[in-house]
Amino acid sequence: ENPDTIEWLNSLVRSILFRFKTSSKLQNLLIEKMDEILNNERLSYLGRFVITNLEFGKSPPRIEKISECSRVPDKIGTLKETKNVDYEILFSVKDCANIGIETELILNWPQASSATLPISLFFKLNEVKGKAIINFANVGSQTFFEFCFSEEPFIDIGIGSLIGNKTKLKDVAKLSRLIRIKLRNVIKQKLTRPNVFRYQINVLSDLDYSDDGEIKSALVPIDVLNSSGDLRLRKDLTEEDI
């Protein structure tokens, strides 16, 4: 729980968020992943989800505490990492993101799929706080980022909706409740221990080189990702840049 380590991690988180805000490539990758999760988990009476808007808030996540914790095998199998240590972090973030989604409500009366109604959904993620477990696992030349919540996090989310063509129903309470229940189930079944979200980090493909071969920027603020997988914060990245 060294204060310098916590501050370093907060700088790392801010810089990663900065890269997401300024990189259309990374935003598109995130939208593709969200699209995959939403459409794999959607209810039978809803059509395909289309993400129409994604905006990050101005306040970056804040890590308040970090500690090592013993590794517990997850449901999708443990990788053979070079380091078998997980880190549990206590974090909070406010004004997280605004998300717009469009879909269709499929009407199954008087017969199946007899009609559809367009739905526009608006999500404002106001606050998220809880305990998360992270790990950077090296497998040969590949690096994986692992993430899960150690317990269900606190999430404050506002949901708005418009249903219909000419006559639009605004903020249907039943639909909002169903979405909240579904969101909670997805977080519990996909992102809460022992379930783990695992993502392969393609470090080299995310680097931006100048004409003389020097690295100008990267997905994470690093000088070098060495053979042991250690990340070093770029010294030229200032608070103003983030």
Image (spheres, rainbow, N blue to C red):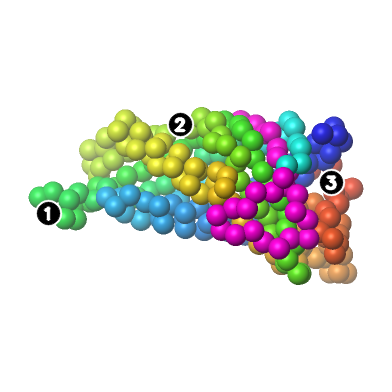
Q: Is residue 97 left or right of residue 48?
A: right
Kindly identify which residue carries mark 2: 158
Kindly identify which residue carries mark 3: 237
Q: Earlier in the sequence, mark 2 or mark 3?
A: 2
Q: Nearer the viewer, mark 2 or mark 3?
A: 2
Q: Quadrant of residue 229?
A: bottom right
Per the image, is 145 magenta?
no
Kindly identify which residue carries mark 1: 111
Q: Earlier in the sequence, mark 3 or mark 1?
A: 1
Q: Amino acid at mark 1?
A: Gln
Q: Is residue 152 left or right of residue 71?
A: left
Local crowd at mark 2 within 10 Å, few (<14), some, or many (≥20)? some
Query: Of residues 63 and 228, which is closer to you in this image?
Result: 228
Q: Which residues are magenta?
A: 70-95
Q: Nearer the viewer, mark 3 or mark 1?
A: 1
x then y, percent, for residue 230: 84, 55
State the separation of the CA atoms marked 2 and 3.
34 Å
Q: Amino acid at mark 3?
A: Leu
x then y, percent, for residue 36: 47, 58
Tell me the quadrant of the picture where the C terminus can be found. top right
Q: Is residue 71 left or right of residue 166?
A: right
State the separation of the CA atoms marked 3 and 1.
60 Å
Label 2: element kind: strand
Q: Nearer the viewer, mark 1 or mark 2?
A: 1
